[in-house]
Amino acid sequence: MNASPPPHAGEPGVPRHVAVVMDGNGRWARSRFMPRFFGHKAGVDALVRAVNLFADRGVEYLSVFAFSSENWKRPSEEVSGLMSLVLVAVAKYLGKLAKDGVRIRIVGDRDAVSDKLRQAWEQAEALTRENTRITLAVCFNYGGRWDMVQAARRAARQAVAEGWSTGQIDERIGEGWLGDQMALSFAPDPDLFIRTGGEMRISNFMLWQSAYAEFHFTDCLWPDFGAEEIDRALAAYAQRDRRFGMIRAPAAQAAG
Ligand code: IPE
Ligand code: IPE
Ligand code: MG
């Protein structure tokens, strides 16, 4: 299906791009005396719910942190469980997401994952390529530092090939050069950065892109993140005064 964008997309106060650190699956499972994997499975269900809820509210891009460059340091059973969960999730939900108008993009270093996983991702991207309701960027084997390093490497290669001076390297996304080399160059910078699970840190997500994001931290564990929490985060965002280094216009200041 190629559902048209919702009428309120781009409306003031509604973030175009929401980035989420989906944290707390392990604690959610532990509180139920269940293995951590049970929490990760519930986390996939929460993600499929969330993408539709955000789309209904006019969000155009949802980027989620699913597996970090550092998550390889977890016990090998958990790492392999997460890898196999991706295959299960694609088999279970790809048809539904495609039908719901979701365009899927996988962001991260694909070199370290199995051929099977790479093929599942390629299938997900190919099947949903034409969808326009919302773009879901699944950040897997992703790290903000990895992204900056690979962008710098590509930029350096291009500079050598074209005989450019270092002064020609520009930071602006869209027109400039470094942002264009980043794995998320297809999306605008995130407006709203949410982290569930109670920790107040970025953990290497969106280091470059979150320069002017509004942050929202919640104790809610990711598998419990539903409509109520989403509306709370969006309402908090709508109250923020985004200045981007400028000052408010005098009329707006007078109005309070
Ligand atoms: C986030 O949940 C999912 C991944 C990092 C893959 P966690 O697994 O980090 O859950 P907690 O933080 O231990 O509760
Ligand atoms: C961040 O969560 C990574 C993902 C949600 C994929 P972590 O649970 O890995 O982060 P830390 O270790 O608490 O910083
Ligand atoms: Mg965690």
Image (cartoon, helix red, strand yellow):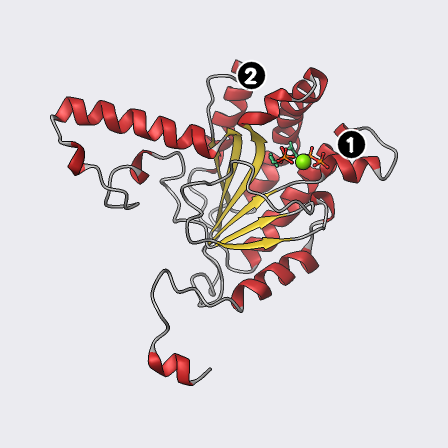
**Which residue does the numbered mark 1 point to in the structure image?**
38
SS at circle 1: helix
Q: Would residue 171 be found to the left or right of residue 193 on screen?
A: left
In x, y percent, where is residue 122? 47, 26
Q: Specify the amino acid type for callout 2.
A: Lys
Point out residue 34 in the picture as x, y percentages from the top left corner. 85, 32
Label placed on residue 116: 2
- Percent from the top left, x then y, of residue 142? 50, 30
Disc 2 residue lies near ligand 1 with CB under 8 A: no
Residue at the spot x=83%, y=35% of the render? 30
Camera-side residue of 76 and 48: 76
Among numbered discs 2 and 1, the one appearing first in the sequence:
1
Instruction: Determine which quarter of the picture holds residue 32.
Output: top right
* Residue 99 vertical position relative to residue 233 in the rendered view, above or below: above
Q: Quadrant of ligand 1?
A: top right
| For discs 2 and 1, the disc positioned in front in the rendered view | 1
175 versus 76 height, above or below? below
Nearer to the camera, 62 or 254: 254
Q: Which image quarter: residue 67?
A: top right
